């Protein structure tokens, strides 16, 4: 890692641990530097903070919302006081399950790296939807909130990486099916 800011030359840097890695933030100018995906994640978290959104769930919600056929309904960082766990819920606007399969495979691949067990739950409120959330532990759900928040950053990082891989399912062509 650098010992001074490549942008302004200042030597006072803050080391930030994030999603299993680390990056540096310049105390003087706020420049972030380190692995490209972690810089992107830290920028998304800043954006969340400025919007008053939830820092850990916002990047994940943004990623899902940017996928074809996916509409994010709600997301939350959870609440350590009440023990409400972090989640992202989303609907499928074209009823294709590609993103659910991609997400399921990502969680399977990440299984040994995550602190919580994660579930993709089918829900129905006003419309069919899915909710990605940490499984609630029988005892002390309040103590699960922070690990689940850390997991969300890891999941974001994995999704960003895996979405470039060959096995990632993409709606091909995006051509409207003929109406019957
Ligand atoms: Zn700087």
Image: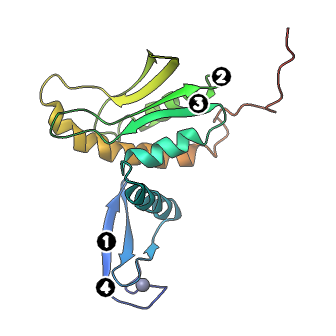
Residue 132 position (above or below residue 31):
above
The answer to whether mark 2 and mark 3 are in CB contact below 8 A is: yes
Mark 4 vs 3, N-terminal side: 4
SS for callout 2: loop
Residue 74 in percent (x, y) is at: 43, 34
Q: Residue at x 37, y 58 (%)?
A: 49
Q: How far apart are the two marked residues, 4 and 3, measured between alpha carbons?
A: 42 Å
Q: Residue at x 43, y 26 (%)?
A: 131
Q: How far apart are the two marked residues, 2 and 1, measured between alpha carbons?
A: 41 Å
The residue that label 3 is drawn on is 99
The answer to whether mark 2 and mark 1 are in CB contact below 8 A is: no
Q: Nearer the viewer, residue 72 or 105?
A: 72
Residue 1 position (above or below residue 79):
below
Q: Dot 4, crowdedness within 10 Å: few (<14), some or many (≥20)?
A: some
Judged by depth in the image, the label closer to the viewer, 2 or 1, is 2
SS for callout 1: strand
Q: Which residue lies most toward the top here?
A: 180
Residue 88 in percent (x, y) is at: 42, 34
Q: Dot 3, crowdedness within 10 Å: few (<14), some or many (≥20)?
A: some
Mark 4 vs 2, N-terminal side: 4
The residue that label 4 is drawn on is 12
Left or right of 77: which side holds 59?
right
Residue 173 position (above or below residue 52):
above
Q: How far apart are the two marked residues, 2 and 3, measured between alpha carbons?
A: 8 Å
The residue that label 1 is drawn on is 15
Residue 19 in percent (x, y) is at: 38, 53
Left or right of 80: which side holds 20?
right
Mark 1 vs 3, N-terminal side: 1
Q: Is mark 4 within 8 Å of ligand 1?
A: no
């Amino acid at each position: 890692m650098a010992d001074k800011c490549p942008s302004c030359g200042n030597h006072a840097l803050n080391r930030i641990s994030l999603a299993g890695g680390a990056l540096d933030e310049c105390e003087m100018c706020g420049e972030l530097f380190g692995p490209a995906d972690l810089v992107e994640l830290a920028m998304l978290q800043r954006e969340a903070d400025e919007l008053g959104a939830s820092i850990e769930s916002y990047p994940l919600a943004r990623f899902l919302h940017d996928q074809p056929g996916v509409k994010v309904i709600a997301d939350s960082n959870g609440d350590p006081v009440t023990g409400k766990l972090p989640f992202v819920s989303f609907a499928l606007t074209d009823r294709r399950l590609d993103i659910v399969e991609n997400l399921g495979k990502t969680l399977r691949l990440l299984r040994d790296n995550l602190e919580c067990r994660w579930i993709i739950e089918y829900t129905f409120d006003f419309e069919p939807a899915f909710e990605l959330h940490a499984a609630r532990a029988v005892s002390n759900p309040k103590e699960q909130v922070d690990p689940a928040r850390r997991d969300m950053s890891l999941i974001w990082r994995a999704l960003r990486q895996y979405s470039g891989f060959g096995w990632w399912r993409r709606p091909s062509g995006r051509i409207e099916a003929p109406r019957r």
